[in-house]
Amino acid sequence: MSAVMQPAAEPLLLRHDADGITTLTLNRPGQFNSLSEELLTALQDTLDAIARDTTVRVVVVAGAGKAFCSGHDLKQMRANHSKEYMQRLFKQCGRVMMTLTEIPQPVIARVHGIATAAGCQLVAMCDLAVAVDSARFAVSGINVGLFCSTPAVALARNMGRKSAMEMLLTGDFIDADEAREKGLVNRVVPVERLDEEVMALADSIRGKSAAAVALGKRLFYRQLEMGLEGAYQLAAETMACNMMCDDAAEGIDAFMQKRKPEWKGR
């Protein structure tokens, strides 16, 4: 296990690698894993390194302590009350969120406790999410006079518009089952099954072609921002490129020969 250290010698971010699955644990439990500048920097640096690491097949994002993530570090924000600081902070956070979609490996959020404001945004920006049945979600900035504009970008791309707007305008919590119904998480399980369910999902993805997964993830997010005709053009080109990959040939041959494919990697 590796860790990015903060000045007080406490690890900000833990990284654990096992069998192609990398778990990143936000490690500010006393602050409910709020996203300080330093934690965002640690996340960015680690995600950039993972993007270049062909041994990593799936990434899991988790939180230490009683919560997944409570959003931005409000104390740090109030201590740096200038527009320039806020612009820099939200640009930094946006870059981390975008990187989650840009790295070739699928990212699974492992959610327990609360996921609020930028923490809820983090769940939405991960490719997949598994939540414990007691988890709760909110974008509660409106309660302190701050509309959660950056989380709104993620919520609007994961949920129906009216569901997203209701969360943003009321700041009310929703429970895990409602989060699943609204498209914010994929699976909801009892706490004793949380790790088992996360690993089952990660194992399923790990067994697929890394080349096909990376191509597909890139296509998925690019086409979302395009018109229908452009999306189909991009999808067709991606399919053609995918068919030229060694893994596609191996996968089709293995299917016809009724055997397990042997993937070549990225």
Image: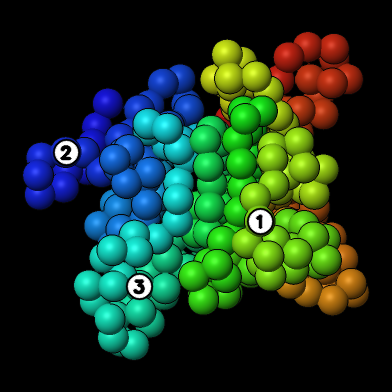
Q: With 205 as the anchor, is 10 left or right in this view?
A: left
Q: Please tell me whether mark 3 or mark 1 is closer to you in this view.
A: 1
Image location (x, y in percent) of residue 30? 29, 40
Residue identifier under label 2: 10
256 versus 33 height, above or below: above
Rounded to the nearest angstrom, the CA distance separating label 1 from label 2 is: 33 Å
Could you tell me the amino acid type at mark 1? Asp
Answer with mark 1 or mark 2, whichever residue precedes in sequence. 2
Q: With 3 as the anchor, is 124 left or right in this view?
A: right
Looking at the rendered structure, the secondary structure element under dot 1 is: loop
Looking at the rendered structure, the secondary structure element under dot 2 is: loop
Asked whether the beta carbons under mark 3 and mark 1 sit within 8 Å of each other, the answer is no
Residue identifier under label 3: 89
Q: Residue 17, can we see it?
A: yes
Residue at image coords 61%, 54%: 138
18 versus 54 height, above or below: above
Q: Residues within 10 Å of mark 1 (few under 14, many from 20)?
A: some
Residue at image coords 87%, 66%: 232
Asked whether the beta carbons under mark 3 and mark 2 sit within 8 Å of each other, the answer is no
Image location (x, y in percent) of residue 193? 61, 15
Answer with mark 3 or mark 2, whichever residue precedes in sequence. 2
Could you tell me the amino acid type at mark 2? Glu
Rounded to the nearest angstrom, the CA distance separating label 3 from label 2 is: 22 Å
